[in-house]
Structure formats: C-alpha cells, structure tokens
Image (tube, helix red, strand yellow):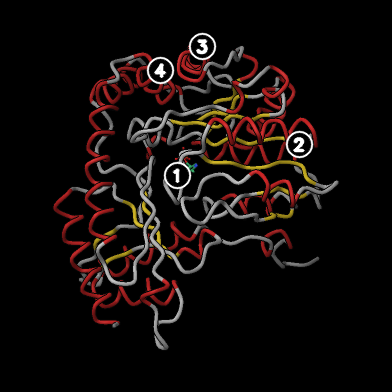
C-alpha cells in the first residue's frame, strides 16, 4: 500500500491564471487594491433574456439529470449555428455538450491522444493546452507563430511533424495574442493534416469577438477535412456566460461517442437549466453580442495606442478576442530581467495584475486582458506606464 499521489499529478501544473486569481483574492482580503488585467472574461453580465431562460427552467423544475450528450434541442441549436455562422454541416450525433469549452478540449485530447503521442501547439498558446496534453500522456511540441503579427506559420508546423504527430491545436481568434488566422493559412494547414494524417483541434471560442477580418472555420474546407477536425466552441465569451460552464465539441460520430463516454463517467451531463439558457443564447436576439464586440473594439484601440507609446514596448494590434500581447523585453533591466519578474514588480508596485508571456510559452511578453471598463483601463495603463518609466 502507498499513500503517494499518482505520478500523473507530476506531469502538469495548475492553471496559472486560476492561481493568480487566487493570489489576487488573498491580496484584496489583506486590504490591497488590485486592478485585474489578467482575467479571461467579459466584464459585462449575462444578457437578461438568457438569465430569464435559465430562471424559467429552474422554476419549471428542470433540475434532474439530462441525457449525457446534451439535450436534442440544444444540439439542434448548435448544429444550426455551425451551419449558419461557420458553413459546416454537423448532425446531432456529431455534437457533444460539455462543462465549458475547457472540458470539451480536455475530453477531445483524452479521446485521441495516446501515451507518447506528439501534439503540435503553435505558440504563443492558450496556457491550458500543453498541460492538458501532458495530463493525457502526450508530448506538446511548440513551433512558433510569425513573431511580427502572430499569424499562423504552416511551414513551422510542417517542420515539426513526425510519425508520432497526433494533432495540431489551433486557436483563432487567438488567446493570448488576439491574432486571427487567415483563410489561406487554414486551408494550407488542412492540406497538411490530410497529407500527414493528423487531427486538428480548432478552438473557436472567440469567434464572435473580431475587429476587422472574417472568421474562417477549418472544418468547413471539405468533408474529408471535417473528418480530421474537432471544432470547439462555447458560450463563455460571446454571451458573457463564464460562470455557467457550458461549451461543446463537434466532430466525427466516433470521436463524439468517445467524448460522451468520458463525460458519462465524469460529469454525466450539463445541468438542464443551463442548457435551456444556452438555447436562448443561440436562438434569441444577438444584439448584446454586437454591443459587447463594439465596446471591446474601442478598448482594444485605446490599449493599443497607449501601449505603443510606452518606452521599450512593442505591440502587434489584436484583431480579435480581448487580449493584447506586447513585447516588454525592451523594459527589462538587471534587476527585473524576465517577464515573470516584470509582472511581479507591476503587481507589487502598482497593484496591476497581468500575465507573463512565459505562461503562454512566449517569454519576454505580457498578456493584458482589455475586458474591463474604459475607466479601469485608463487607470491600469497609467499605472503600467509609471512602472515602466521607473525601470528606465
Ligand atoms: C482559448 C480558450 N479556450 C477555451 C477556454 C475555456 O472556455 P470555457 O469557459 O468555455 O471553459 C478559454 C477561456 O479562457 C480560452 O481562452
């Protein structure tokens, strides 16, 4: 007998954003005032019509177990959305409803990745992907996006493909950079996926928050490409539903059956009243999405202009999501010599919480979430600028 923890627990770490949020809560409890520029959630609240749908469902006693894969009405609404918005035909047996897009990502990886399989993740990347792959026993491989604008570089991916490559994980619009991958680059990746026979996990959770270019879904290229793709999406960002915990995966029926098998042993189903709220999100009025998108665009412009004018800061302009990812290597000195030390310094000195680029496999940069009010952003930018000027 041994009371040691499993060796699996040594393979991966806790989410750095979740850990930082816990630290901020402690600092606030100790009386410090902290501006959170680290959080990945809209500052807006869930629209009233969606909340009302959830409340109606609870009052109507929609509080029992539901079918494992998600209620048919919700999967129908998702299939309709994927056809209308993304030009992909998914049947109901090709859709699994999950506890957030995060669960859909983790279950997809568990469903396809064997011990020792390689999973290519272009970087900078969403910080959960590498640890999810490690948790599943896979090996993350990190080719770079184009450093100037963080666009997708398929040649860099091609160079890292081996006989053990199982999948490539992409995220467009991108967390943490805000870049949007072009249709051309996604078609090129689709060709490579067919040639080398690997999966593409396409995380499209920021698809509704874009400031110029058009979104393109890689699964829409052709039926054979679709059979290699797992499309991930959710409700957290577009409908300000982070705390409801609902998302989905769409893929071939055998992949979806495997994902559902995992969920059947893990979470059983998503609560019925949350699924009812999600139906309202997709089928109800969409004006709140556009209002939120516009407000983020204004905030993106403000942060971009402020950061670009700061000494030592280089900043590609985000085209989607609500993050900006400036290079701050020009601000570092002998004492504050890494992005992590920089974030620690800004948190301690100025009470502004930001994420270090190294958490996204890209040292020398920082990630700032601009999903806060203009007033808060102004204060945060003033404080960040003051901290940078003190370093000079
Ligand atoms: C790229 C990306 N994918 C997935 C998620 C998880 O979303 P959900 O709240 O639906 O689990 C996030 C959340 O920050 C994200 O940034």
Mark 3 and mark 1: Cα distance apart in space: 30 Å
Residue 198's disc number: 2
**255 with respect to 210 (left or right):** right
In terms of sequence position, does the residue under pointer 1 or pointer 2 come before the other?
A: 1
Identify the residue position indicated by label 4 in the image: 279
Q: Residues within 10 Å of mark 4 (few under 14, many from 20)?
A: many
Labels 3, 1: front one? 1
Q: Are marks 3 and 4 in contact (CB under 8 Å)?
A: no
Q: Residues within 10 Å of mark 3 (few under 14, many from 20)?
A: some
- Which residue corresponds to the image point at 56% horizontal and 51% vertical from the top-left? 145
Mark 1 and mark 2: Cα distance apart in space: 24 Å
In terms of sequence position, does the residue under pointer 2 or pointer 3 come before the other?
A: 3
Name, please, the residue furthest toward the left: 375
Q: Secondary structure at mark 4?
A: helix
Q: Using the rendered view, name the quadrant where residue 200 is placed.
A: top right
Q: Are marks 3 and 1 in contact (CB under 8 Å)?
A: no
Of residues 3 and 155, the one nearer the viewer is 155
Q: Position of residue 121 (x, y in %)?
A: 63, 49
Mark 1, ligand 1, within 8 Å: the answer is: no
In terms of sequence position, does the residue under pointer 3 or pointer 4 come before the other?
A: 3
Q: In this picture, is 388 found above or below 379?
A: below
Mark 1 and mark 4: Cα distance apart in space: 29 Å
Q: Quadrant of the C terminus?
A: bottom left
Identify the residue position indicated by label 1 in the image: 179
Mark 3, ligand 1, within 8 Å: the answer is: no
In terms of sequence position, does the residue under pointer 1 or pointer 4 come before the other?
A: 1
Mark 2 and mark 4: Cα distance apart in space: 33 Å
In terms of sequence position, does the residue under pointer 3 or pointer 1 come before the other?
A: 3
Of residues 369 and 110, the one nearer the viewer is 369
- Which residue corresponds to the image point at 68% horizontal and 34% vertical from the top-left? 262
């Amino acid at each position: 007998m041994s009371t040691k923890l499993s060796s699996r627990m040594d393979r991966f770490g806790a989410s750095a954003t979740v850990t930082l949020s816990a630290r901020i809560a402690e600092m606030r409890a100790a009386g410090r005032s902290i501006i959170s520029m680290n959080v990945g959630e809209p500052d807006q609240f869930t629209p009233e019509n969606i909340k009302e749908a959830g409340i109606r469902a609870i009052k109507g006693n929609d509080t029992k177990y539901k079918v494992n894969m998600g209620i048919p009405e919700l999967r129908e609404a998702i299939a309709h959305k994927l056809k209308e918005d993304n030009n992909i035909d998914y049947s109901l047996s090709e859709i699994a409803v999950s506890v957030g897009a995060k669960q859909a990502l983790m279950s997809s990886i568990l469903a396809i990745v064997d011990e020792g399989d390689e999973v290519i993740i272009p970087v900078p990347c969403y910080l959960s992907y590498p640890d999810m792959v490690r948790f599943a026993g896979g090996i993350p491989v990190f080719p770079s996006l184009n450093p100037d604008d963080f666009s997708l570089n398929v040649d860099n991916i091609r160079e890292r493909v081996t006989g053990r490559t199982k999948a490539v994980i992409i995220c467009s619009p991108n967390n943490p950079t805000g870049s949007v991958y072009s249709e051309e680059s996604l078609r090129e990746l689709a060709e490579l996926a067919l040639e080398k026979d690997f999966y593409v996990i396409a995380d499209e959770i920021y698809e509704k928050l874009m400031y110029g270019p058009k979104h393109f879904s890689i699964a829409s290229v052709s039926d054979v490409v679709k059979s290699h793709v797992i499309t991930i999406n959710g409700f957290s960002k577009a409908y300000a539903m982070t705390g409801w915990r609902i998302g989905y995966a769409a893929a071939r029926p055998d992949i979806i059956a495997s994902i559902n098998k995992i969920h059947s042993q893990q979470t059983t189903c998503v609560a019925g009243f949350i699924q009812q709220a999600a139906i309202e999100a997709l089928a109800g009025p969409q004006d709140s999405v556009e209002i939120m998108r516009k407000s983020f665009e204004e905030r993106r412009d403000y942060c971009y202009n402020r950061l670009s004018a700061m000494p030592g800061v280089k900043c590609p302009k985000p085209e989607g999501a609500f993050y900006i990812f400036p290079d701050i290597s020009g601000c570092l000195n002998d004492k504050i010599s890494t992005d992590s030390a920089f974030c620690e310094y800004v948190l301690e000195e100025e009470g502004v919480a930001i994420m270090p680029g190294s958490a996204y496999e890209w040292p020398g940069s920082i990630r700032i979430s601009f999903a806060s009010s203009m007033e808060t952003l102004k204060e945060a930018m003033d404080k960040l600028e003051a901290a940078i000027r003190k370093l000079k």
